[in-house]
Amino acid sequence: MRSFKLLDRLLGRKPEIEKSYAAMLRGEHVTFEPGMVVIEAPLYPEAERIAASIRDFPEDWGWARKGYDLVHVPSGFKLWVANEDYGIAEVHPNNGATFFSKPEQSIIWPAVEGWLARHKVGFTDLPVKPRITPLEGRFYCKLSEHQWRGVGRTAGEAYCSWLAAVSMKARAQLPKGEVLTV
């Protein structure tokens, strides 16, 4: 037995299958053995990987600029997703963008829509200015759209109390152990 045949046997290689695969890659006609399955490679592998990542690991994605760019937190890859009509693009560190082709966008956009549905863009700016009213030595802060009312000894305390009730961002910035009257 020749040494190459011995190596092929030890490594589990089948030269006839490898030859037919090489011929297929060259565009030649090939006859496969019965039972062999040919798997088609995706036409847009990068778009498939991005969409699969957004669908399968949504917790790895977050906002780089809320409402505009998604960022893949582990890698830093940014994706422009402001709206479907404008298109989906890869955002570069210098804020340039490379747009995906229309077929690639049609693969990525359904996954992005699913992510956006789970992570709705909500309160992005400062709240509307509430009304602060003094009454019996205390200040009350209220806005007609919100059911919460802030109470404090000063107008500033009342506003901070109200803002913490209506804004998650304000609650996160509070010092530990601070008690609010709402």
Image (tube, rainbow, N blue to C red):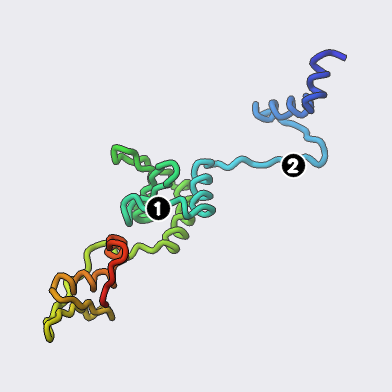
Q: Secondary structure at mark 1?
A: strand
Q: Quadrant of the C terminus?
A: bottom left
Of residues 170 and 50, the one drawn nearer to the viewer in this rendering = 170
Say which amino acid is labelled 2. Val
Kindly check if marks 1 and 2 are in contact, taking CB atoms under 8 A apart as contact.
Answer: no
Residue 85, percent across and down? 36, 55
Q: Quadrant of residue 67?
A: bottom left
- Whether 161 is drawn above or below 109: the answer is below
Label ID, residue 62: 1
Q: Is residue 105 left or right of residue 177?
A: right
Residue at 29 percent of width and 41 percent of height? 95
Q: Which residue is mark 2?
A: 37
Seen as rendered, the residue at the extreme right is 1
Residue at 51 percent of width and 52 percent of height? 57
- Whether 46 is drawn above or below 69: the answer is above
Residue 101, percent across and down? 43, 44
Label ID, residue 41: none
Seen as rendered, the residue at the extreme top is 2
Cα–Cα span, label 1 and label 2: 39 Å
Q: Secondary structure at mark 2?
A: loop
Whichever of callouts 1 and 2 sits on the residue coming sooner in the sequence is 2
Residue at 54 percent of width and 41 percent of height? 45
